[in-house]
Image: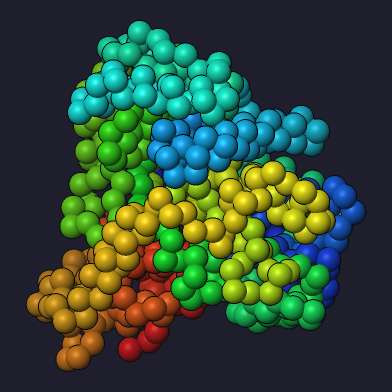
Amino acid sequence: MASPSTTSVWLTTAQVPSYSPLTSDTSADVCVVGGGIAGLTVAYLLTQVGKSVVVIEDGAVGSGMTGVTTAHLVNALDDRYFELERLHGERGSRLAAESHTAAIDRIESIVARERIACDFTRLDGYLFCAPEQDEAYLDRELAAIHRAGLHNVVKNGRTPLSFDTGPCLRFPSQAQFHPVKYLSGLAEAIERGGGRIYAGTHATQITGGAAATVSTAGGTVTAGSIVVATNVPVNDLVVVHTKQAPYMTYVIGAQVPRDSVPLALYWDTGDPYHYVRVQPGVDGDHDLLIVGGEDHKSGQADDIAHRHGRLEAWARERFPSMGDVVYRWGGQVMETVDGLAFIGRNPMDDDNVYVVTGDSGNGLTHGTIAGILLTDLILKRHNPWEALYDPGRITLRAAGEFAKEAVNTAAQYTDWVTGGDVAAVDEIAKDSGAVVRRGATKVAIYRDATGSLHERSAVCPHLGCIVAWNPAEKTWDCPCHGSRFDKFGGVINGPANVGLLKT
């Protein structure tokens, strides 16, 4: 049997159209930096009202976190409604439910209007207890859900799964789709609306104000407004990054007999929790069971190589018909201190620079909310969600979480004075990496399949933390603010905007 793919099923089974890099100066009403769901949604909605839009993407459209999501479209949020109510009040909890519901509806309407073949399906979602939780937890959450206005959520005796999950909450009218096929359709609709998309175009500098510009190696985009939708903002050092923390999450995709697992979305209440869905009809006889979980703080786990294996063991215990694991992959989520994304004007920046970050595990709906909200802000239209998602907000009831994350981040700088992962370079296996101490500094060394060594500074160019090797993803991950680099040191995730430096 061949080894499972380390690329997500979405990037394996679909491809967005290819776009050329920017090669000359240009201008637009709005320049969007980032080609994931948030960037393309705001670009699409702006072209629909006649605005000229330029989208630039560092890699290929959809090659970032949108291409590795498990594509749950839900108003059943990862951060419980009783917790959102504590942090944001009952009105804030209601607005969160309203906005995520509206995001699912907006995706459905775009799919219908643009005739995007992306497997969009409405279905139920089920939240059931992990062994360490009891039924009272569900009762508490259900009461908060109803106060948030989701009165159609009910408590059932069990889920439709073959194993006994015990009591659960059923969330009707959730949805799933193929995210890369959806992005492909969005991109084509943007171009039909007059928008321009440039891939392989790295933003080297972002400047707001009267002469707002995005500089790249191939040319400069001058715009009336700039939207930074790069998953994590690459245009500031500190302000937003102190209010969110990066977590890696892992996914497996395994074959199951066709129609053997009821089509629905499933989540348990564990910490970290598990999330499950089915992608129907991968071939004539099988569906694909997609199982995720095993989250940990980025760059802060020493058992990463075992995370996919633990997911597989958890799934096989509950789905005995599960066959071969054919996909293994991972992604990074940004958890904010108060459970909701940061969407709006960039703090301590010019008024025409906007950011979206802090997906909090619900990146597809948060990204769609960003498209709706940022379009309204740019067009100077009222939006009732503005204050709830304001990147400059200070949630006093989240002060404890803010302090805990600050202490955690500060602790990572002690890596400067510790030893390396290995004592000698000879200990690094082929197709693997390790941090090695060399005098007063540290070096990130990757040994490729031929045995050749590739060395870069282990110091993250964002704010100087020491990166860690991720053996599951073959990446260098920063434990402070979530910058990630490929095995050769090239930047693949902000807030760093350049790769690891040469030694």
The residue drawn where x is 37% and y is 41% is 251
Left or right of 479? Residue 123 is right
Residue 81 sits above or below residue 498 on the image: above
The residue drawn where x is 39% and y is 84% is 501
Picture quadrant where residue 84 is located? top left
Query: How far across and how far down the image is residue 15, in percent?
Result: 61, 47
Direction top: furthest residue:
157
Query: How far across and how far down the image is residue 240, in percent?
Result: 49, 65
Left or right of 394? Residue 481 is left
Residue 209 sits above or below residue 301 on the image: below
Query: How far across and how far down the image is residue 468, in percent?
Result: 27, 67
Residue 473 vs residue 133, the one in the foreground: 133
Q: How is the image coloured?
A: rainbow
Residue 269 sits above or below residue 233 on the image: above
Direction bottom: furthest residue:
439
- Which quarter of the figure is the C terminus placed in? bottom left
The residue drawn where x is 57% and y is 45% is 366
The residue drawn where x is 62% and y is 33% is 98
Query: How far across and how far down the image is residue 316, in percent?
Result: 25, 25
Picture quadrant where residue 310 is located? top left
Direction right: furthest residue:
50
Question: Can residue 299 be spotted in the picture?
Answer: no
- Which quarter of the figure is the N terminus placed in? top left
Number of numbered discs visible in the structure rendering: 0
Question: Can residue 32 be spotted in the picture?
Answer: yes
